[in-house]
Amino acid sequence: MLDKIIPLADIRYASRLPVIPASVAAPIGLLSDTLGRPLRDLRISVTDRCNFRCSYCMPREVFDKDYAFLPQGSLLSFEEIERLARIFVAHGVEKIRLTGGEPLLRKNLEVLIEKLARLRTPAGAPLDITLTTNASLLAKKAQSLKDAGLQRVTVSLDGLDDATFRRMNDVDFPVGDVLKGIEAAQRAGLAPIKINMVVKRGTNDSEILPMARYFRNTGSVLRFIEYMDVGATNGWRMDEVMPSAQVVALVHDAFPLTAVDANYTGETAERWRYGDGGGEIGVISSVTQAFCSDCNRARLSTEGKLFLCLFAHQGHDLRALLRGSYADEQIAAAVGLIWQSRSDRYSELRAGLPSDDGSVAAGPKRVEMSYIGG
């Protein structure tokens, strides 16, 4: 499956220095891109490292012991992240999600959470601060994360069968320890917890019903994610995608479901509620049912590059501005210009792109998910 993988050495992520407008205006709190989409959600990668080697994200064949991760000096400091977060909040961001790699590998992450928790929107409202994790360290850190100001967590879990899970994370990590992390997060009040399961046909689709059965009536929201063609290293093939419609039908046959409206504009998951009141599930259908039309998310990489799409091939180097002689107002103006020029809608265009023998779509080499988070 991985014979088409492209070495990361050949796909260094392109970036460009943002343009500073000649006339600098203060952030106005509301930005729209060329398709009328506002900026509301900022996802911040705090590390490009992870202790798992999931094949759909960081396959061991590429991310091996010789892989060169970013040096510490290249990473944004917590102070730099806070500075950029403040600028984005002034432009309308209401939600910040910390990602990785595995974000809990970043030392003293609680310090950053404390800084972000003090930020307020122009209207004075606190931010929605969340974190996505594989939960390998969550049992130890859940309470300190909550005490620092984290509100919720999303846990990546691709099955309950221990052999299947160990095979997918490719580091022989036991599923029981992830479940202990989820329990610790529940006790700490990091709720409602979302559980993300990436479904690969022929790999873990047999785990769909066991996962639904386990998380019913727990207060956690299980979300099934279509296997996506993110980056260039995971050997993606369309025939390994299980459409969300099939997942919903499978769960519905066992536990009748009713469609539910989105919680907010731009929500990635389509919601379904159990008819007997046992909670809800979600499906994220980036491949078969693109939701680009209301995407309001920006992504900040570990080294300060701003990406406007999960499938982007080029970022905008904000770190150069942070470490240059630019004032906050100038950086804010540059961010505003970048967003107002945004036209990304890769998932909507995917179906019309040529592909290499049915595998990864051809075109510019896309950024890896482990570099900018999901």
Image: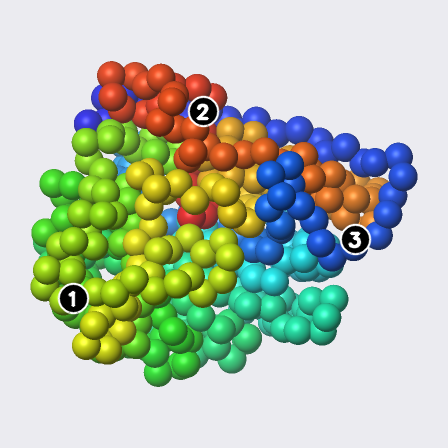
The answer to whether residue 353 is above or below residue 108 is above
Residue assigned mark 1: 256
Q: Amino acid at mark 1?
A: Pro
Q: Which mark is residue 365?
A: 2
| Residue placed under numbered mark 3 in the picture | 27
Q: Nearer the viewer, mark 1 or mark 2?
A: 1
Image position, residue 178 (x, y; %): 26, 65
Dividing the picture into quadrants, the one containing residue 64 is top left
Residues 47 and 13: in front is 13
Which amino acid type is marked by label 3? Pro
Secondary structure under badge 1?
loop
Q: How far apart in space, not on screen, are marks 1 and 2 (Cα)?
A: 41 Å
Give the answer, above or below, for where 217 lies relative to 263. below
Q: Nearer the viewer, residue 182 or 264?
A: 264
Q: Is residue 12 visible?
A: yes
User: What is the CA distance from the residue labelled 2 to the residue labelled 3?
Assistant: 33 Å
Question: Does residue 44 appear to the left or right of 66 in the view shown?
Answer: right
Upstream in sequence: badge 3 or badge 1? 3
Contact, mark 1 vs mark 2 (Cβ under 8 Å): no
